[in-house]
Image (cartoon, helix red, strand yellow):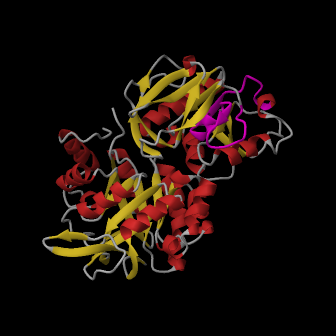
Amino acid sequence: MTLTKRIIPCLDVKNGRVVKGLNFESIKDAGDPVELAKRYSHEGADELIFLDISASDEQRKTIKNLVREVASVIDIPFTVGGGIQSMDDARDILLNGADKVGINTGAIKNPQVITELMKLFGRQCVVVAIDAKRNYELSDDVTIFSEKGKKFWFEVFIYGGKQGTGIDAIKWAKQAEELGAGEILLTSIDRDGTQDGYDIQLTQSVVNSVSIPVIASGGCGKPDDIVAVFKESGVDAALAASIFHYQTHGVKGVKMYLKEKEIPVRL
Amino acid sequence: MSKIAIFDYGAGNIFSLKNSFEQAGATIEVITSFDKPNNYSGLLLPGVGNFDPAIKSITKFSKTQFQDFVNNTTPVLGICLGMEMFFDKSEEGIENGLGVIDGEVIILPPSMKVPHMGWNDLEIKKPGKILQGVENGSWVYFVHSYRVKPTSNEVITAESNYGIRVPAVVEHNNFFGTQFHPEKSGPVGKIMIQNFLDECKK
């Protein structure tokens, strides 16, 4: 037997509630985070990821209590991200019961925080989250892709997908690994919320560029999308939200389907 | 009720470990030195942090030595890094390990993705106290970059195979170690936590 592929439900949390958006916008309510965490854990999720998308620091303070509550009810690993800028933010999350912290904008603004976190908490605690979007205005020094005759590159976006950085996502993934990241959470902004399937090109390119585990995110609408991203990109884990929140497919059902398709999963 | 001590190296999530043992009925005290008398029925060495800072927090700041505190009788469960510290030395650092099990800790080969992160099945090699009631092939959650290499394979009660064979559970006298995280391994982990607590009651 080999290491299994991981299925990771993601809970976007805003002001203490789970919400779901399309292309990072138009939010709707999807339930209570602690209840959903418990349900997914019982259904056989391999890990959970919480992303705090609260708009202000004031609202964000609720996340610490939420982390404790979640840690008390589940017995699988979980990652918390969103709004983590400093060592203190990360420490708050880890000491309250999270196993890993996801850092996104904070890592772009201050890449050294990746190294500091790795030294203190160990590499396995540090998940660098990368939100990437296709950019058709080519520039020097970027990794060029093409699809249907059109050329583009993947640009890193920060502040919840609102602001471009001019940074090449493939290069940033490599740099994050060198700085001390233990895992990459890779989200396609183009696909997020569309249910059109994962961005295989993006995922495959990052998987081939780093030697740490990669989680594919953005675009999952059906179990076959997960089959495709595992088979075509070699990614280690797949994150999904909508297909689990609205009970279109249970975690267990998805995993049984993956097993039928000869993808190693924990059942 | 068992009173169990968790040694806190000061680096990371011990909340989940504490919580899982409390749910299993234990009373937990978090300690940061061995200077108070040992009135615990068991000791946990958690699995988060780096080798050198963690081993230093155990060996350098207490007047009482780890071995004197444990005195060959207190059951000790080392998880991941906690288990790695049982051995003589580790490629992760330059400090000496606790040396309660002969052998060393080596880095996972570069042919693998490191850290090794995720769920693997257990191959049970022989009966062990921690493994009572655990089925062969059970899934447990690993996250590590190093593996142990005991001098004697006798101490290994279960392995995992992910291209290379990795010792997953070791037992030697009152020392029990798991390379994976029982507190993160769902229902199977709960069985092992209960087994350790049963051992602490003896």
In the displayed image of the protein, which residue is found farthest to the right?
B63
Q: Is residue B73 magenta?
A: yes
Tell me if I can see residue B188 in this picture: yes
Decide if residue A166 is on the left or right side of residue B68. left
Q: Name the image quarter holding residue A68.
A: bottom right
* Residue B153 in the image: above or below residue A238: above
Give the x, y percent position of residue A35: 39, 57
Q: Name the image quarter holding residue A168.
A: bottom left
Give the x, y percent position of residue A187: 34, 66
Magenta stretch, overall SS: loop
Quadrant housing the N terminus of chain A: top left
Give the x, y percent position of residue B145: 52, 43
Residue visible at 37% across and 47% down in the picture: A46
Q: Name the image quarter holding residue B73.
A: top right
| Number of dots carrying numbers | 0
Observer-nearest residue: A224 or A137?
A: A137
Observer-nearest residue: A58 or A100?
A: A100
Look at the image and give the residue range highlighted in magenta.
B69-98
Decide if residue A176 is on the left or right side of residue B65. left
Give the x, y percent position of residue A43: 32, 46
Decide if residue B75 is on the left or right side of residue A233. right
Decide if residue B149 is on the left or right side of residue B66. left
Residue visible at 63% across and 47% down in the picture: B50
Tell me if I can see residue A241 in this picture: no
Q: Is residue B94 magenta?
A: yes
Quadrant housing the C terminus of chain A: top left
Residue visible at 68% across and 30% down in the picture: B88
